């Protein structure tokens, strides 16, 4: 349950799905994260903000262990998802990533058909039944609000879609695996305003069923889409609170300076 | 700052060099085709040699070279691609693997006769295969391995990081990621690079000289333990060792032309494979 001293503005009965405790992260000899202790509530949107290079992506990638692939990197501290330490020895990373989906800054559909893109996850997890795959693909595309645009060309190459469509396809592809948590690293930063709005609307719809952690550089976007906001600065978590509180009345001076555009 | 006329001068010089290269290659091709084409007929291609190659056809040599090409592909492609996958995807960046890379690059520069001697020592004598298609293919495979590994590693590394990240984030294991989202896109580059390397090897004389090639063997091989005639070696003999070398120019040119067409065919195959995959996977 929520520690009221640290999170005075969180509802008492808020269920926390991700908890991190004094997390340090190192790229070889350089430390990128210092002592991050953060709670992330279930079925809400949490935004990570902060100046470039402050460690937002690094932190996000710790949550589904994507940093494992970086040579000579190291994590200290504890990260638990549903009370399970995800860095404990013997953790099944495949199971973890089925639970925790990720959407990247640069949309990265595979150079395969739209159908095969969305079916990719279920297929590698052993779904062979064509009827079931078709269902999953349709459902995921609908959830990602792109079904109407692609339903007539599921066999077309995904590379032929527009940037915004590609990003929604990537969201559909992540959803097809059936995650409970969705990590998004600046999912709209490479898109035009109209596509950005669509992605934001989509996040609004997804928040009822998914826990979403989103990194964004866009203050307005954080304010629009998130329920809670965490402010990072130089590898440290400066403050985390309900989004309206952060944007109107932050506790820390650094937060205030950042959101009012005095640096970063 | 370079001014406009220096720029033009450099462009002119580069263009001149290119034309010179094309001219030289064009002349060689022209010479071979002009002198070789009259010799090319069905009898020449499908017939067996007579009078130690002074008359008749070169069918056994064609079969020999083709079987060496097939053998070399069968051995070197899986080994080379496997090695490249290890180096590009699994090997850590440490001193030992740097050393391995260095060894591979060095191996690419080893003279082909050294590979021939190595093949003689290891495959012919030590393994006891005798001079045979097997020993020759293994020797040629050793020779083209560096080319295949380097070309394959490059095309593996060319697959964008985004595909890798996306696969892993969807819960693919490393091997699933490689199998489903790396190999399909790098396959064309790997195969093209490999075939070009093997095409070059098909024309080599030194490595097969001591390991497989027969001086004169007017029959077809029965198994991979048989010796065969091979086009490059046959050409070498006709041109330099044959008592009637001066009188059989048309046989020499004909053989050269067939060898050229064979290598050209391989390259053409490589290009077709590449365009096929390019159309299928583009990003
Ligand atoms: N693979 C890596 N190897 C070494 N250092 C890295 C690596 N990736 C990131 N860093 C460093 O770690 C720090 C945090 O980087 P990170 O990408 O997490 O920042 P960020 O907050 O996401 O920035 P941005 O807003 O620009 O995306 C930076 O100083 C960065 O240079
Ligand atoms: Mg980032």
Image (tube, coloured by chain):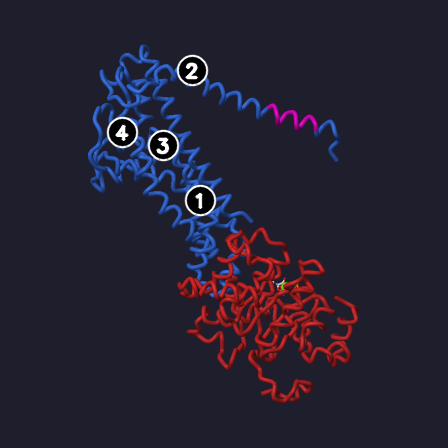
Chain colours: A red, B blue
Circle 2 crowding by C-alpha within 10 Å: few under 14, some 14–19, many from 20: some
Q: Secondary structure at mark 2?
A: helix
N-terminal of the two: label 1 or label 2?
A: 2
N-terminal of the two: label 3 or label 2?
A: 2
Closest to the observer, A247 or B109: A247
Q: Chain of mark 4?
A: B
* Mark 3 lies within 8 Å of ligand 1 (Cβ measured): no
Residue placed under numbered mark 1 in the picture = B190
Q: Secondary structure at mark 1?
A: helix
Q: Secondary structure at mark 4?
A: loop
User: Which residue does the image show at 43% across and 33% down from the upper left?
Assistant: B267
- Quadrant, the C terminus of chain A: bottom right
Numbered disc in front, either 1 or 4: 1
Marks 3 & 2, CB-CB < 8 Å contact: no
Residue placed under numbered mark 4 in the picture = B213
Q: Secondary structure at mark 3?
A: helix
Query: Residue B34 — which label?
Result: 2
Among the 4 quarters of the image, the one containing residue A169: bottom right
Quadrant of the displayed image that contains ligand 2: bottom right
Bounds of the magenta span?
B8-16
Marks 1/4: CA–CA distance: 29 Å
Marks 3/2: CA–CA distance: 23 Å
Closest to the observer, A17 or B193: A17
N-terminal of the two: label 1 or label 3?
A: 1
Q: Are marks 2 and 4 on the same chain?
A: yes
- Quadrant, the N terminus of chain A: bottom right
Circle 4 crowding by C-alpha within 10 Å: few under 14, some 14–19, many from 20: many
Residue placed under numbered mark 3 in the picture = B202
Across and down, in percent, residue A66 comes to: 52, 66
């Amino acid at each position: 349950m929520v520690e009221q001293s640290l999170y005075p503005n969180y509802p008492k009965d808020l269920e926390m799905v991700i908890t991190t405790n004094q997390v340090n992260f190192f790229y070889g000899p350089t430390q990128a994260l210092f002592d991050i202790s953060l709670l992330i509530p279930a079925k809400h949107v949490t935004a990570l903000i902060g100046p470039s290079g402050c460690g937002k992506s690094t932190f996000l990638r710790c949550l589904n262990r994507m940093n494992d692939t970086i040579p000579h990197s190291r994590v200290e501290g504890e990260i638990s998802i549903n009370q399970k330490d995800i860095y404990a020895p013997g953790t099944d990373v495949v199971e973890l990533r089925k639970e925790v989906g990720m959407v990247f800054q640069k949309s990265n559909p595979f150079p395969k058909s739209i159908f095969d893109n969305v079916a990719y996850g279920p297929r590698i997890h052993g779904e062979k039944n064509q009827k079931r795959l078709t269902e999953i693909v349709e459902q995921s595309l609908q959830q990602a609000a792109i079904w109407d645009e692609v339903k007539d060309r599921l066999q077309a190459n995904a590379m032929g879609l527009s940037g915004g469509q590609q990003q929604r396809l990537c969201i559909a592809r992540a959803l097809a695996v059936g995650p409970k948590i969705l990590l998004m690293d600046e999912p709209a930063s490479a898109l035009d305003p109209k596509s950005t709005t669509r992605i934001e609307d989509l996040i609004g719809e997804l928040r009822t069923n998914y826990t979403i952690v989103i990194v964004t550089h866009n203050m307005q976007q954080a304010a629009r889409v998130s329920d809670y906001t965490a402010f990072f600065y130089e590898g440290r978590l400066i403050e985390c609170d309900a989004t309206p509180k952060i944007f109107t009345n932050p506790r820390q001076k650094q937060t205030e300076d950042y959101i009012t555009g005095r640096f970063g | 700052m370079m001014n406009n006329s220096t720029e033009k001068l450099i462009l002119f010089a580069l263009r001149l060099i290119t034309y010179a290269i094309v001219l030289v290659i064009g002349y060689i091709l022209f010479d071979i085709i002009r002198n070789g084409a009259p010799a090319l007929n069905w009898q020449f291609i499908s017939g067996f040699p007579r009078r130690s190659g002074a008359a008749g056809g070169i069918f056994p040599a064609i079969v020999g070279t083709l079987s060496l090409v097939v053998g070399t592909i069968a051995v070197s492609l899986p080994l080379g691609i496997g090695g490249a996958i290890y180096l590009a995807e699994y090997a850590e960046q440490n001193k030992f693997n740097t050393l391995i890379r260095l060894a591979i690059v060095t191996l690419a520069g080893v003279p082909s006769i050294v590979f021939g001697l190595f093949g003689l020592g290891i495959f012919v004598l030590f393994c006891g295969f005798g001079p045979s298609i097997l020993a020759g293919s293994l020797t040629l495979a050793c020779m083209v391995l560096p080319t295949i590994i380097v070309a394959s590693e490059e095309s593996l590394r060319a697959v964008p990081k985004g595909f890798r990240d996306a696969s892993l984030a969807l819960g693919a294991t490393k091997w699933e990621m490689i199998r489903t989202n790396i190999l399909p896109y790098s396959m064309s580059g790997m195969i093209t690079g490999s075939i070009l390397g093997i095409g070059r090897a098909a024309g080599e004389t030194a490595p097969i000289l001591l390991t497989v090639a027969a001086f004169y063997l007017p029959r077809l091989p029965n198994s991979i333990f048989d010796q065969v005639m091979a086009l490059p070696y046959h050409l070498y003999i006709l041109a330099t060792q044959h008592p009637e070398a001066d009188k059989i120019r048309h046989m020499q040119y004909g053989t050269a032309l067939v060898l050229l067409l064979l290598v050209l065919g391989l390259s053409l195959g490589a290009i077709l494979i590449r365009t096929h995959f390019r159309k299928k996977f583009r990003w």
